[in-house]
Image: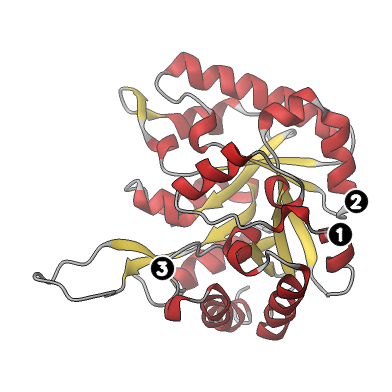
Amino acid sequence: MTRPLIAIQQIQIGTVSSTEAQARETLGALVAAGFAGIELNSFQTQATPWLVRALTKAAGMPAGRGGKLDWHAMLADFPLRVVAIHEALGTIEADTTAVISRARRFGTMHVVVTGMYRFDYSGLHEVESLVQRLNAAGRRLADAGLRLLYHNHSVEFRKVAPGINAFDVLIEGTDPAFVNFEVDCFWAATAGVDPLALMHRLGGRVELCHLTDRGSRRTGSSMTPIDKIGSVELGLGNMDIPALIEQASEAGAAAVVLETHKNWIDGSPVRSAEVSAEVLRRHLAHAR
């Protein structure tokens, strides 16, 4: 079995890729750290409305201003495979041809849809409607040889009926021939869900795995011993990173994608990535 690639989500390097010189320096540092892949976001690889950038920043994910750069040309100079590109579901529906063109231009077969503020998870009917949209979009992409993946956050684990959460509906309702998953272990854990059990449940439907460790870091003086919980580098939190990496490998995931989008060690997204990359390399070397 081929081991997953070590990849990084573009959001992590948004603040250090605002100019071409800065982006190239950052990409070179990632390659030196052992990364072999990168996951791109459409809103970071092309001109994006200010509202999208503002909403992303409000969610605690610094997008930066690299959308004006030619990422295709830059990546051609580095041994980083594009493992996926994130696209809005509405964009896939409104202009499937453009999405297919972008994915092919970057040489990736995975198009990822992420929820956050875009979808209504308040009830069973609303989530079932999302399932129908995902299946239809996935079918369009499959006709072009692409794979549609759904990326979770925490809101999908809210109950929409007694004993049933929104993610249960997404799993059971989506057609594996057209829709599969990029499991974000951090957000599942944040919602109180065991990410390892979730990955076991999904099995081979986990085509990409997002990893961020979950713990606390003292950032200043405190009157109590309680620190705020957030993302930290792999191995510095309380998640079972080795087991999650092993399960991703067993599932045949194409890549394990690092995304530590804030709370970086030394305040540096690159230094943070270097620390986590060492953990990824060590554990993937022993994965089956």
Q: Mark 2 sits on what residue?
A: 105
* Earlier-in-chain disc, 2 versus 1: 1
Q: Identify the amino acid type marked 2.
A: Arg
Q: CA distance from mark 2 to mark 3?
A: 33 Å
Tell me where residue 228 appears, x and y as whole percent: 25, 62
Q: Is residue 135 left or right of residue 160?
A: right
Q: Residue, x 41% and y 68% (percent of image)?
A: 263
Residue 11's x, y, as percent? 60, 58
Alpha carbon separation for disc pair 1 and 3: 29 Å
- The amino acid sitting under disc 1 is His
Q: Residue at x 35, y 51 (%)?
A: 190
Q: Is residue 205 above or below residue 64?
A: above
Identify the mark nearer the N-term, 1 or 3.
1
223 and 22: which is toward the camera: 22
Label 2: few (<14), some or many (≥20) within 10 Å? few
Q: Does dot 2 land on a helix, a strand or a loop?
A: helix
Q: Quadrant of the C terminus?
A: bottom right
Is disc 3 placed on a helix, strand or loop?
loop
Q: Which kind of residue does numbered mark 3 sit on?
A: Asn
Q: Which residue is mark 3?
A: 263
* Picture disc at residue 72: 1
Vertical placement of 138 versus 85: above or below?
above
Determine which quarter of the picture holds residue 90: top right
Measuring from the top left, give residue 264's x and y in whole percent. 45, 72
Q: CA distance from mark 2 to mark 1?
A: 8 Å
Quadrant of the rendered image containing residue 248: bottom right
In this rendering, does residue 170 appear at all?
yes
Is residue 249 visible to us here? no
Q: Quadrant of the N terminus?
A: bottom right
